[in-house]
Image: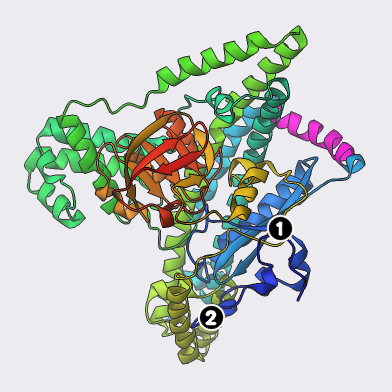
Amino acid sequence: MSERRGPFPLPSEITDVPGAEGWASMYAPFTRFGPQDDAKFWFYNATHFPEPLPAFDGISSEVAYSAIGANTARIFVFPATLGIEHRIVNGRVYLAANPVTDPEEVGRRLEIFQRRAGYYYEHWDRLYGEWKQRMQAAIDELESIDVPELGDVDDEEVVTTARGYASNHLVRERFHRCVDLYSIVWNHHIEFVMLAFGAYVVFSEFLTKAFPEIPEQSIARMVAGIDVIMYRPDEELKRLARLAVSLGVDDLLTDGAEPRTVFEGLALRGEAGATWLAEWERSSVPWFHVSTGDGLYHHHRSWRDDPRVPLAGLSRYVSQVRAGDDLRRPTERLKEEREEVARRYRALLDADEERAAFDQMLGLCRTTFPYIEEHKFYCEHWFTTQFFAKMREFGQLLTRFGVLDEAEDVFQLQHYEIDQQLANVMLAWSAGSSPVGTDEVKAIVADRKAMLAVLATWSPPPALGPEPEALNDPAVKLLWGITAKTIRTWAEAADPSSARIQGFAASPGVVEGVARVLASVNEIDQILSGEILVCPVTSPSWGPVFGKIKAAVSDSGGMMSHAAIVAREYGMPAVVGTGTATRRIKTGDRLRVDGDQGVVVILS
């Protein structure tokens, strides 16, 4: 074992959680820590993977970090950073960014980056429009893929069209196509986002050099007031709430109402109920293809699949409509404020060249910034919820042939293992026999379910390994909120009984109020107007909450995390990346949230 350096345990010092000693079997060998990894700094990615990772869901980390590294290091050639490595331990995902520290190499890469990134920046609107077309095409193709039934005999058209192969061939071909599309979509996902992060980082560094005391929030406020499609699902709920009140069917949309009760009740309300249900359906495709999580776990179903979350938000909006509340986000006010902040700092610059550079960089940020939120709807939500739904269809096939007890069990297998079991079914169907080794597969599924329950009790360290010499990846700072200050805060290991919790100053303002600690979006019906949300991490499904709360506090996230962006759009304070807020704060605690300093204080 290597000698420990610094305040964090080394990867080799992490022991198995008792009762889940076989956890490593759930993931591909290349995701496990090795002796060479003790020399690197790793941080826990609680932003995207706040729960133990089921075996199949490991594909999300596999394709995501493959795409990030390829885009950053091989396509656009970011000057000071290579890709991001990932490892899994006790079901949790840890990341390490590989920096470029040699000045000569940074200079060589900078020349390439400026040329390649410059092309995208110059043609951003056209390329982004083409990107949307590619994403729509990928979604359409995924939804069109049929999983073969494999009935008693093949269709007559196999003969009349002289197709030349039976339907069992299509089982694995179409499974591979689904997996390939998921990989393609993740590459499209990263295509623009790192460039958007990069544009913001360059602007931020310019302002920090010119104004060493400038708050990070002031920089962020200059690009606030955006209107992106990721807000559309929440806006559709507001529209449906207004419609329910105007049609007189709002009495059915109450807190805690079961979806079946709501929809059956509306069906009995004559024309008014039929009108509202038709509008619900119109909103559902595509806007309710939004995950109840961040789109990376199979069990975070879409609003369309599981209406409980949107109905909880809808009931709140109905109450606000009845009360005459304004449900609009303060977008126009934020736009006025951003222009005022920008004018103030621009006027303090001395030279015409500096002002011209300021104008250019700010304009680029405002052009690229919407993508940071907007792409999520296409990738993590619309496509991914449909991808998991398609995997359930393959699970149904495996269930029909006795490999699994139920379709949902398919997610307890790695995608490599599913490939093998589909081959098992293909061979059995062609031979007129039964798949081999089904009892063994079912035992593996049962063991993994039990291990996931045990792994959920583990509290992962925020970081592993020695403190890093450099943090040069823009996503590490902006998305995950990992800075030298963050690491120092973790390293100091403050007394858990302390009333002060340090985090990342994500949205300005100072407020006091009562905490509401929520473990997941499924609990949003518990939050009361004027409370302070404390949660592990937010995703777009949390949208209905932001019109009700005073402030937001999260365990993970950075300046460009979802909670930070939405809090700024609603003009409320936010502190993200605290690491420990949900463990140290209890519902009912009175808090002071200081979004200027990134501090939360438990007052009582």
- Whether residue 113 is in magenta: the answer is yes
- Percent across and percent down for residue 295 are 47, 53
Q: Earlier in the sequence, mark 2 or mark 1?
A: 1
For mark 1, give the secondary structure.
loop
Q: Residue at x 59, y 30 (%)?
A: 216
Outermost residue, right side: 104
Mostly what secondary structure, the magenta segment? Answer: helix
Can residue 456 be seen?
Answer: yes
Q: Closer to us: mark 2 or mark 1?
A: 1
Which of the 4 image quadrants contains residue 484? top right
Q: Position of residue 523 (x, y in %)?
A: 30, 53
Reply above or below: 282 against 118: below
Q: Reply above or below: 577 against 222.
A: below
Q: Amino acid at mark 2?
A: Gln
Region of the chain picked out in magenta, as a range? 106-121
Tag shown at residue 421: 2
Picture disc at residue 525:
none
Q: Which one is nearer the viewer's eye here, 546 or 595?
A: 595
Can you see residue 229?
no
Quarter of the image for the N terminus: give it. bottom right
On residue 41, the disc is 1
Helix, strand or loop at label 2? It is helix
Q: Is residue 553 left or right of residue 186?
A: left
Q: Find residue 465 and report its horizontal and vertical position in percent.
A: 70, 62
Q: What's the CA distance linking mark 2 and mark 1?
A: 37 Å
